[in-house]
Image (tube, rainbow, N blue to C red):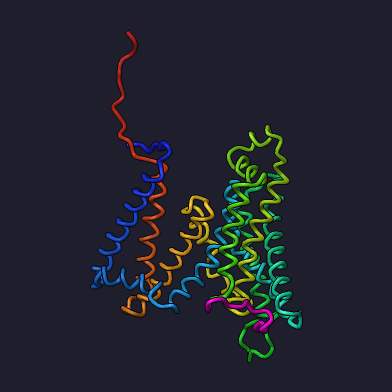
């Protein structure tokens, strides 16, 4: 047996492969649930109800989907250029740090102006945080995967220092927390959900247009396919890389502002919830398509919210619920392998030379 690259599958074939993967996930997940003494059908129905069954659950699913969706869009921009931005967690933290500075020190400003300043500061800080490894990559050819990954830990330690020392709230009775945002620094709500969902939908549209219908989007695609081709076409690779990486980091930085001003109400070490790493998976599963990013991110959020629901509804241990979620994710990710590759029988080698 050997692994061979497939010819490109059409949309119908890709759909069938993914349906087969989901079916396999449900079957193996069902076996796991039977071993726990639970009815698989009841659990699966409850997971859907846990994510969508009431407006409260739907709202919680959307709240989980918003940061995942926007972060996925951010890393997707970098991935289009084959720049492996593994540092979204750090960009989110630094964006939240910049937004928090203005929220705590300029809360006397009118709400619309303050929120715009917070969003702008978060995007600039997130963009600058990614420009650092991008510049080293363009100038010295450094490994951006390790560079961006290490910057995550620097950002986390910086936020930890702020929370436990420099910005520690003196009125927190010794509890290590940063002061909560005032009402002027809190995102307004539409239909009971903060306006991050509107920003997410707007970003899907804008990034789709940017990548598919602008000159820079074309240059990003060419550089992603072949830097040699890009040079031959006269594209200024360094300029496009730096501009694109700033945009990627800025989008991720915006997530920090949204989470701080829309969910937690302040900056904390728990702000990201790991979305910077989960976004890598959702970006790839979406085929680096902005519209599909929205769909995949929402399904991931529903899976997570449903998993939390069945823990309490069926008294399933948290580890068991996480194993069930991991099984589903594993099969879905495995489907991407079979979309691109196939197993082939290796025939017997012929013996004998030319007569």
> In the depicted view, which residue is nearer to us: 87 or 127?
127
Q: Which residue is drawn at 30% across and 21% down?
A: 350
Residue 280, above or below 138: below
Q: In this view, does 241 lie to the left or right of 292?
A: right
Is residue 139 in sight in this rendering? no
User: Considering the image in quadrants, where does the N terminus appear?
Assistant: top left
> In the depicted view, which residue is nearer to us: 236 or 293?
293
- Indicate the position of residue 27 as horizontal and vertical percent values: 27, 60
Q: In the rendered structure, does residue 60 fall within the stretch colored magenta?
A: no
Q: Which residue lies furthest to the top in this view?
A: 355
- Indicate the position of residue 284 as horizontal and vertical percent values: 49, 52
Q: Is residue 181 left or right of residue 332?
A: right
Q: In the rendered structure, does residue 181 fall within the stretch colored magenta?
A: yes
- Indicate the position of residue 269 as horizontal and vertical percent values: 59, 74
- Indicate the position of residue 253 as horizontal and vertical percent values: 65, 64
Q: Which residue is drawn at 73% across and 46% down?
A: 239
> In the depicted view, which residue is nearer to us: 6 or 187?
187
Residue 107, above or below 43: below
Q: Residue at x 42, y 68 (%)?
A: 302
User: Considering the image in quadrants, where does the C terminus appear?
Assistant: top left
> In the depicted view, which residue is nearer to us: 244 or 168?
244
Counting the numbered discs, the total is 0
Q: Where, by quadrant of the figure, is residue 314 drawn?
A: bottom left
Q: Which residue is drawn at 61% across and 71% down?
A: 258
Q: Is the magenta stretch mostly helix, strand or loop?
A: loop
Q: Give the magenta range.
A: 179-192
Is residue 56 in sight in this rendering? yes
Q: Where, by quadrant of the figure, is residue 56 drawn?
A: bottom left
């Amino acid at each position: 047996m050997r692994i061979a690259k497939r010819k490109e599958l059409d949309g119908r074939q890709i759909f069938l492969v993914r349906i087969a993967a989901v079916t396999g996930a449900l079957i193996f997940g069902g076996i796991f649930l039977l071993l726990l003494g639970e009815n698989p059908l009841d659990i699966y129905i409850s997971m859907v109800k846990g994510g969508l069954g009431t407006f409260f659950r739907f709202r919680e699913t959307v709240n989980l989907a918003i940061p995942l969706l926007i972060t996925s869009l951010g890393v997707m921009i970098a991935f289009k250029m084959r720049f492996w931005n593994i540092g979204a967690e750090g960009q989110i933290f630094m964006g939240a740090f910049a937004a928090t500075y203005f929220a705590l020190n300029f809360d006397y400003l009118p709400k619309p102006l303050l929120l715009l300043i917070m969003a702008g500061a978060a995007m600039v800080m997130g963009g600058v945080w990614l420009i650092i490894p991008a510049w080293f990559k363009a100038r010295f050819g450094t490994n951006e995967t390790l560079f961006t990954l290490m910057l995550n830990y620097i950002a986390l330690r910086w936020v930890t220092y702020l929370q436990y020392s420099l910005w520690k709230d003196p009125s927190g009775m010794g509890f290590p927390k940063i002061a909560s945002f005032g009402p002027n620094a809190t995102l307004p709500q539409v239909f009971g959900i903060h306006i991050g969902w509107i920003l997410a939908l707007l970003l899907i549209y804008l990034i789709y247009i940017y990548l598919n219908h602008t000159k820079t989007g074309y240059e990003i695609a060419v550089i992603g396919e072949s830097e040699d081709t890009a040079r031959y076409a006269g594209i200024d690779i360094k300029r496009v890389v730096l501009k694109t990486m700033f945009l990627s980091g800025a989008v991720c930085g915006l997530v920090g502002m949204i989470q701080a001003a829309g969910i937690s109400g302040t900056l904390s070490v728990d702000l990201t919830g790991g979305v910077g790493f989960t976004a890598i998976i959702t970006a790839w599963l979406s085929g680096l398509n902005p519209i599909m990013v929205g769909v995949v991110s929402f399904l991931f959020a529903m899976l997570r919210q449903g998993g939390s629901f069945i823990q309490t509804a069926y008294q399933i241990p948290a580890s068991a619920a996480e194993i069930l979620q991991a099984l589903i994710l594993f099969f879905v990710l495995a489907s991407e392998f079979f979309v691109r590759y196939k197993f082939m029988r290796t025939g017997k080698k012929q013996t004998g030379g030319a007569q």
